[in-house]
Amino acid sequence: MTIWGTIIFGVIGMAIVVVLEIIAIKPLKDKAYLGWRLAFYVIWIQLIFSVLNDIFLGTVSGLIGVIIGTIIALFILMQVRDYFIPDQKSADPESPDPENS
C-alpha cells in the first residue's frame, strides 16, 4: 500500500472512532449502558485499525504498545461496567416488589 493509502486508511479509522466517541458522550453522561457499549466498540475498532495500519506499513514495532494500551483500556472499562448495567428490579416492571408484598 502506498503512503497515501496508509494515510487515508488511518484518517478513516480515526474518523470512525471520533464519531463513535461523540455519539457515546450523552449516554455515558446519563450512565446508560449504550454509552458503555459504544466505548467498548471504540476500543476494539482502535485495535483493529492500529493492527491493520501496522501490517500495511510493514512494521510491528507499534504492535506491542497497541496491545498494552488495549489491555489497559479494557481493564478500566470493565472496572466501571457495573455503573452502566441497569438494575434488574428497575429493568423489569412486571417483577413483584418484595417490600410491598
Image: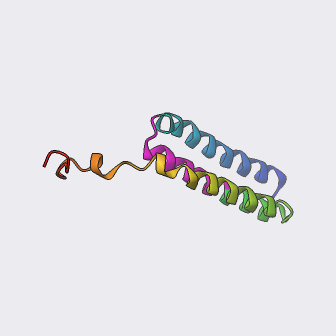
Q: Is 73 within the magenta?
A: no
Q: Looking at the picture, does residue 82 appear above or below residue 21?
A: below
Q: Is 41 within the magenta?
A: yes
Look at the image and give the residue range highlighted in magenta. Answer: 30-46
What colouring style does the render use? rainbow
Q: Looking at the picture, does residue 16 appear above or below residue 59?
A: above
Q: Position of residue 18 (x, y in %)?
A: 62, 40
In depth, the one of 10 and 45 nearer the eye is 45
Q: Position of residue 5 (x, y in %)?
A: 76, 53
- Kindly identify the residue that appears in the image at 72 percent across and 62 percent down: 52
Q: Is residue 41 left or right of residue 91?
A: right
Magenta stretch mostly in which secondary structure?
Answer: helix
Answer whether residue 49 is visible to the viewer in this image: no
- Kindly identify the residue that appears in the image at 83 percent across and 59 percent down: 62
Q: Is residue 19 left or right of residue 55?
A: left
In depth, the one of 42 and 79 nearer the eye is 79
Quadrant of the image for the N terminus?
bottom right
Q: Point out the residue furthest to the left here.
A: 101
Answer whether residue 48 is visible to the viewer in this image: yes
Q: Is residue 18 left or right of residue 11?
A: left
Q: Looking at the picture, does residue 66 appear above or below residue 93?
A: below
Image quarter for residue 48?
bottom right
Image quarter for residue 64?
bottom right
Q: Position of residue 31 (x, y in %)?
A: 46, 39
Q: Position of residue 29 (x, y in %)?
A: 50, 34
- Kindly identify the residue that appears in the image at 54 percent across and 49 percent down: 80
In depth, the one of 80 and 20 nearer the eye is 80
Q: Looking at the picture, does residue 87 appear above or below residue 58?
A: above
Q: Is residue 82 left or right of residue 47?
A: left
Counting the numbered discs, the total is 0
